[in-house]
Image: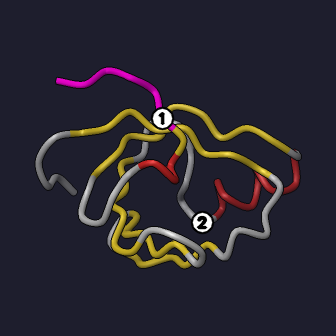
Amino acid sequence: MNAELLPLELLGPGEWGQVEDVAGEPGWVCRMAELGIRNGCRLQVVQPGRPCLLQVEGCRLSLRGECDCQIFVRPVPGSQP
């Protein structure tokens, strides 16, 4: 199992990650939390790049890359919700 912490941008299509840290401007960190992207949540990269399409808690989110924050994840093997 890979325990390395990575920026979200390094996950490929279909890969899962557990959010370990959301860093950056407080307003954006709060906005990400409102959208479900917070420490401990699991997400799946549906489409990498800009925009990035994510599956988070049963919802799909599109991040266009204009936020002033960085999301760090721990890769999770398999397809777990």
Amino acid tagged 2: Leu
Q: What residue type is labelled 1?
A: Leu
Q: Is mark 2 on a helix, strand or loop?
A: loop
Q: Name the residue under label 2.
A: 35
Image location (x, y in percent) of residue 25: 88, 46
Q: Which residue lies furthest to the left in this view?
A: 78
From this view, report whether residue 13 is shown above or below residue 28: below
Residue at left offset 37%, top offset 56%: 43
Q: What stretch is highlighted in magenta?
A: 1-6
Q: Quadrant of residue 47?
A: bottom left
Residue nearest the viewer, comparing 48 with 26: 48
Residue 6: assigned label = 1
Query: Which mark is nearer the camera, 1 or 2?
Result: 1
Quick check: 46 left or right of 79?
right
49 up-or-down from 9: above or below = below
Residue 28, magenta (yes or no): no
Q: Which residue is drawn at 50% across and 32% down?
A: 20
Q: Nearer the viewer, residue 10 or 72?
A: 10
Q: How crowded is mark 2: few (under 14 residues within 10 Å), some or many (20 or more)?
A: few
Residue 23: give x, y in percent of width and height: 73, 38
